[in-house]
Amino acid sequence: PSGIIILLPIIYLFIFSTKTIFFNKLIKTSIFDKAWVISFMLFLFSQLVDIQYFDGRISITFWILLAGAKNIIEEDKLSRKFFKVNK
């Protein structure tokens, strides 16, 4: 149960940030956002093979990438709200 509670928000952020960047045709995304999501994806897949999280640099990298994915989703929500108000 604790593993599911930890993994669900991470999977949620991964799925929705990927959808926002690669499948949303309403907004033009920057190359940096695409690179951010791709690096987050590669980091998640690299952690499936070997557990290296206990190294401090790797854990800090993971949390920074996770925060960036959350920020991408929040920016998309704000832009959608802005477009609805201005229509």
Image (cartoon, rainbow, N blue to C red):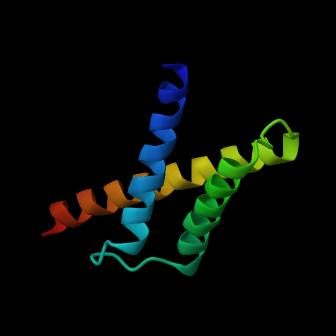
The foreground one among 59 and 53 is: 53
From what the image shows, is residue 25 above or below residue 48?
below
Q: Nearer the viewer, residue 58 or 29?
A: 58
Residue 84 place in picture, x, y as percent: 17, 62
Write the residue at 50% across / 49% down.
70
Residue located at (56% from left, 80% from top):
31
Q: What x and y, as percent, mark residue 34?
A: 54, 73
What residue lies at 59% left-to-right and 48% top-to-bottom?
Answer: 66
Q: Position of residue 41 (x, y in %)?
A: 58, 61
Seen as rendered, the residue at the extreme front is 49
Query: Looking at the picture, does residue 29 appear above or below residue 11?
Result: below
Q: Please, which residue is most extreme toward the top here?
A: 1
Q: Which percent across, then down, holds residue 61?
A: 75, 50
Residue 55, by quadrant, is: top right
**Residue 33 vs residue 2, the one in the foreground:** 2
Count numbered badges in the picture.
0
Q: Is residue 68 left or right of residue 21?
A: right
Residue occupying image coordinates x 45% and y 36%: 8
Q: Quadrant of the C terminus?
A: bottom left
Q: Is residue 40 above or below residue 9?
A: below
